[in-house]
Image (cartoon, grey):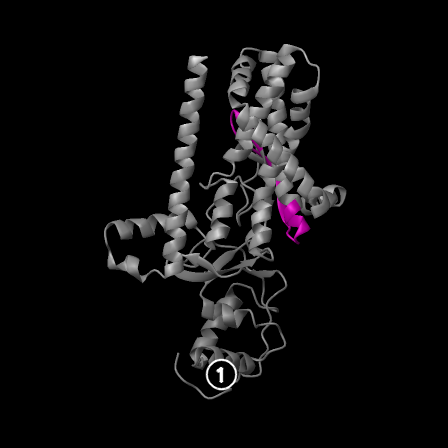
Amino acid sequence: MSAAPPGAVEGLAEYRPELRPEVLLSDAMLHGAATVHLIKDTASGGSFRVGPKEHFLIVRMDGRRSLAEIGEEYAREYGRRLDAARWQQILRMLGTRGLLAGAPARPATATGPGARTGDGAGAGAFGGDGRPARGVLRGSVRLVADADATTDRLHRAVGFLLAPGLLVPLLALVLAMEVVVALRAGELLIHTRELFTNPVLLTGAATLLWFSTALHELAHGVVARHYGGTVAEIGLRWRLPVVIMYCTVGNYLYLGSRWQRIQTALAGAVMNLLFLLPFCALWLFAPLDAATHHALGALLLLGSVQALAMLVPLPPLDGYRIASQLCGATELAASTGVYLRLAARRDPAAGDYPRHARTAYRAYALSAVLALAGILAAAVAAAHHLLTV
C-alpha cells in the first residue's frame, strides 16, 4: 500500500459505495493465527473471510461516505493511505461477488482461499452457512415452506418465556432437577435397565425423547429470532434408522453479540431439560405403579444425558459452538489441532500466534480433554454400578 495524496483514487474519490442490505458482517474472530471477519450475502448464501483492515473499509461503505472520506479514516487509523490499485482491487472483489448496491447478485461458490466458511460445526445442527441437499433420496426434506415466518409465529406464542422474570425461576427448577438426578443417579440407572426390558414403555420413552430433540431444534430458532436472527429452513434429516429434525439459523454467526450467540446455542439443551420438568414432578410426587414410575425415572436420566451431551465442546455439538464463541474463533477445532501440532514439534511458527490465540487454543484443548475424561469416568461408574447391584 503506497502513499498517495487524498483523493488520488483516479476518478473514484467521490464514489460512495454501499453494501447491499442482505450483506452481513461478523465480529472479529480468530482463524488460526490470524484475526478475520466473516462476510455473508444472505441472498446467495455465500460467505468469505477478510482481514481487519479490509473489514475497516467495508464496514464504512454505507452509501454516505465517499472513498476519499473512507481513505482518510483509514489513514488516521493505520498511518498509511490506499493507492488507486488497492481501491480498485477491493471494489472489484466486492463487485464481482455482488455485494455492492447496484451490482448483480452472484450465486455462492465454495472455491478460493477466502471463500465459503462457517464455524466448523458441520451440518445437522441449528446454524451454519450451508443448507442441506434436500429431497427424499438425499436424506433431507423441508417441513415448512417459510421457516422464518413459522419461527416468528412460535416466538410470538412462547417468546414471553425468555423474559428474565420467568426464565430465571425455570432455570432454577432445572438446576434443582439435575441435582436430584445426580444424587439419585444409581436408582435412575436401575430404572433405565428395567425400561429396556419393557418394549411398550421403551417405545413411549423413545418417542418422548425424539419429540424433545424436535423442541431442541425449534428452541434454537426461537431464541435466534428473539435476537433478530432469521431461520432459513426447518426440516427432517435421516441417516437410517435415525431421523432427526433440523433448524437452520442462517445468520447465527452474525447475531448482534457474542452473548446472544451463546444463548442461541444453549437454547436447545435448556429446552431438553425444561421438557423433563413435568416428568420429574410426576416421578417424585405422583402415585404411580412401579413400571410407570421406573419408566419416568429412566426418561429423566436419559433425557438429562441427552441434553448434557449436547454441551460437550466437540463438533458438531452445541457445546462446540459455545466454546467457539467463548474463544472468539471460527473453525476452532481445526485451528486448535494445527496450533498443537506446531507447539508439539517446537515449530517456530507456533510462537507467531498472538497470546490470546495461544490461550484460546490451549483452553479449548484442555476443556475437550476434560469433557472426554468426564464422559469416560461417568460411563465406567455407571457400568460398575449396574454390574454390582
Quick one: label 1, few (<14), some, or many (20+) residues within 10 Å?
A: many
Quadrant that contains the N terminus: bottom left
Q: Residue furthest front?
A: 183
Instruction: Report x, y in % for residue 52.
Output: 46, 67
Which one is in front, 79 or 187? 187
Q: Is 289 situated above or below 95? A: above
Instruction: Report x, y in % for residue 138.
Output: 53, 35
Label 1, on which residue?
9
Q: Residue furthest bottom?
A: 5
Quadrant in which residue 106 is drawn:
bottom right
- Identify the residue at horizontal 55%, vertical 69% (top origin): 59
- Identify the residue at horizontal 49%, vertical 61% (top origin): 28
Q: How many marks?
A: 1
Instruction: Report x, y in % for residue 68.
Output: 54, 83
Which one is in front, 121 or 268? 268
Quadrant in which residue 165 is drawn:
top right
Left or right of 4: which side holds 347?
left
Residues shaded magenta:
223-244
Which one is in front, 346 or 224? 346
- Name the element at disc 1: loop
Q: Is 255 situated above or below 294? A: below
Residue type of the residue flagged with mark 1: Val
Left or right of 113: which side holds 288?
right
Quadrant in which residue 381 is drawn:
top left
On the question of residue 351 being in view, the answer is yes
Is-magenta flag for residue 368? no
Instruction: Report x, y in % for residue 72.
Output: 51, 82
On the question of residue 251 being in view, the answer is no
Which one is in front, 207 or 289? 289
